[in-house]
Image (cartoon, coloured by chain):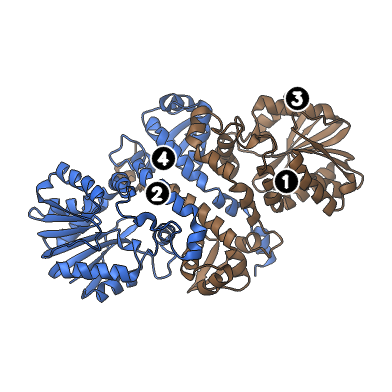
Chain colours: A brown, B blue
Amino acid sequence: MNSPAEQRATTPERFFNAINSYQLTEALKSAVELDVFTAVGEGNTTAATIAERCHASERGIRILCDFLTIHNFLTKQGTTYALSADSAVFLDRHSPAYAGSAIEFLLTPRLRDCHAHLADAVRGGGTALGEGMLAPENPDWVRYAHGMMPMARRPAEIIAAELRREAEVHKVLDIAASHGLFGISVARQNPTAHIYASDWKNVLEVAKKNADAMGVGDRYHVIAGSAFETDFGNGYDLALITNILHGFDIPTCTKLMRKVHFALNPGGRAAILEYLPNADRVSPPTAAAFSLTMLAATPSGDAYTFAELEGMSKAAGFTRVELSPAELGRNRLVIAYR
Amino acid sequence: MNSPAEQRATTPERFFNAINSYQLTEALKSAVELDVFTAVGEGNTTAATIAERCHASERGIRILCDFLTIHNFLTKQGTTYALSADSAVFLDRHSPAYAGSAIEFLLTPRLRDCHAHLADAVRGGGTALGEGMLAPENPDWVRYAHGMMPMARRPAEIIAAELRREAEVHKVLDIAASHGLFGISVARQNPTAHIYASDWKNVLEVAKKNADAMGVGDRYHVIAGSAFETDFGNGYDLALITNILHGFDIPTCTKLMRKVHFALNPGGRAAILEYLPNADRVSPPTAAAFSLTMLAATPSGDAYTFAELEGMSKAAGFTRVELSPAELGRNRLVIAYR
């Protein structure tokens, strides 16, 4: 129970603001679609000039830009707007690190629809929409490959360097390759390495195009189909397992890790990139919160703790599992040794 | 431009989290619908017991409760959840200040649909959906009257006391009466006062019922229809103008204030309850952010500054306009004197 003093200090404001937080989603989506951040970056800094550049009304732009200022995506001095530091790097289309395209995946109708049925997912213990995001050949994963690629550039380079530091590799399996950047970065840091990329056929077209564009197409091979059903072959010294395990339950993940274990040479490594909540499952916030997305959007996925990933890996035959200190934003790198 | 040091410190995380913020809306909505907070308040503190009480899966409840913990609506020790101070007061159905019903209005489909078309609203300078929330007899205002009533109790009492302190009143016009609490509170603090409540017919049924239940039904009268078109009569010494001006542009508000001015006795007061952004229009955050809701949901509404409300009032003939120091959460009280 709360003391009377605590009760006086309580307020429904936080609840109201949280209920209204979908408005922040819509405001940012609108700003990206209207290219407001690019307009400001180009030197249009008043509602009137931004509106002209974005083919919108001055009144609408003024209200939207004030809202973006309240949420620290813009700054405002008098009636002059400017980009916040984050927005300049990630939301101005002229920036090499532009990440606005992420909305193509993050706000794809299927994913939003999954969350619109969240109460049913809580009742049933998994997505209320059939296979959710895991439907075979789901075109959302093509959107993911396009939209999330800019976000993967830096982590992919860090991970490739981290793995190269320990040993050069020659034959690499890249499971859930998506845009291909993780495998491609390994190929670029290991001049003799051949990459075998596993993903849905429609997604691998994006990966292959990127491999060609980044000069490693002649060492890039594709294995189209479900990672649970296709034949990986064997003789690998490295397997990249990036952002796939969270989509499945522990027995299914263990099955996949067993398949990877079989495909690896003795001494080979499985590099797992994952959201990694602490054992309390409520920290760090972004990694822990990702469980909700998996509840909404998959039949039985989850954000797994290190102990859980270690457990799956060991159950699959791996002898040693280590947490890499690499700083990768919302994700962490776990390495399992055969 | 940012210095290299600043660029290193930037991260797309804030953008990603903001884009995903609709998930917080869905999670809180689900928790209220499943009555999770009430379940925890009743002493069900593990995922298993909460799940049983809420007729949901243990896995779904565990993930939802972790998410609510990350956002400080619950706390967690080991595997035991408890209500945060705010949640105990406002989200437990057994609490007299229960505010969960607010989602009936705040997340009404029309309002969400307005925001789903926000980019079009920015382009056009007003709601993309016809009259938006201002459609005549819009049943959402009945939802508002029911859902937001608990939130109005304390502000209504504070405002009535504040107004009573200055002078007793006898004939009171309550424009946009909604649940009626503002007028009813005035009636209770002014034993001879008769209240004339203006709102849509469907909404006034709620207000009249509340007036009867709160013992002032014999002094409660209704004026059904648009506040811009109905005949208010005259001889009032107080007009309550609560949360209506933000729905309209300045000329329309001025017209309404002129109508109120005409209905008031000399020396009469108009008490305006409003979101009141500072002149910078980006603070305080909740009041300033409300402009976006008006852009999305009305043809030409806005959150007005004190100077703007003062301007409308004086243009309508009021001689003096003052800001009350009363603490009313997200709203402020402005008093215009005839």
Q: CA distance from mark 1 to mark 2?
A: 38 Å
Q: Which residue is mark 3?
A: A316
- If you read the primary sequence from the N terminus, does the residue marked by circle 3 or circle 2 appear first? 2
| Percent of width and height locating residue B23 | 52, 44
Q: Which mark is residue A326?
A: 1
Q: Could you tell me the amino acid type at mark 4? A: Ser
Are the residues flagged by discs 1 and 3 from a single subunit? yes
Quadrant into which the C terminus of chain A falls: top right
Q: Is residue A148 visible?
A: yes
- Looking at the picture, does residue B9 appear above or below residue A79? above
Are the residues flagged by discs 4 and 1 from a single subunit? no
Camera-nearest label, 3 or 2: 2
Q: Is residue A256 left or right of residue B54?
A: right
Q: CA distance from mark 4 to mark 2?
A: 15 Å
Q: Is residue B115 left or right of residue A307?
A: left
| Frontmost residue, A96 versus B212 | B212
Q: Could you tell me the amino acid type at mark 1? A: Ala
Q: Label 1: how many residues lie within 10 Å, few (<14), some (14-19) or many (20+)? A: some
Q: Could you tell me the amino acid type at mark 2? A: Phe
Q: How many marks overall?
A: 4
Chain letter for mark 3: A
Q: Is residue A167 visible?
A: no
Q: Could you tell me the amino acid type at mark 3? A: Ala
| Percent of width and height locating residue B82 | 43, 34
- If you read the primary sequence from the N terminus, does the residue marked by circle 1 or circle 3 appear first? 3
Q: Which residue is mark 2?
A: A16
Q: Label 4: how many residues lie within 10 Å, few (<14), some (14-19) or many (20+)? A: many
Q: CA distance from mark 4 to mark 3?
A: 41 Å
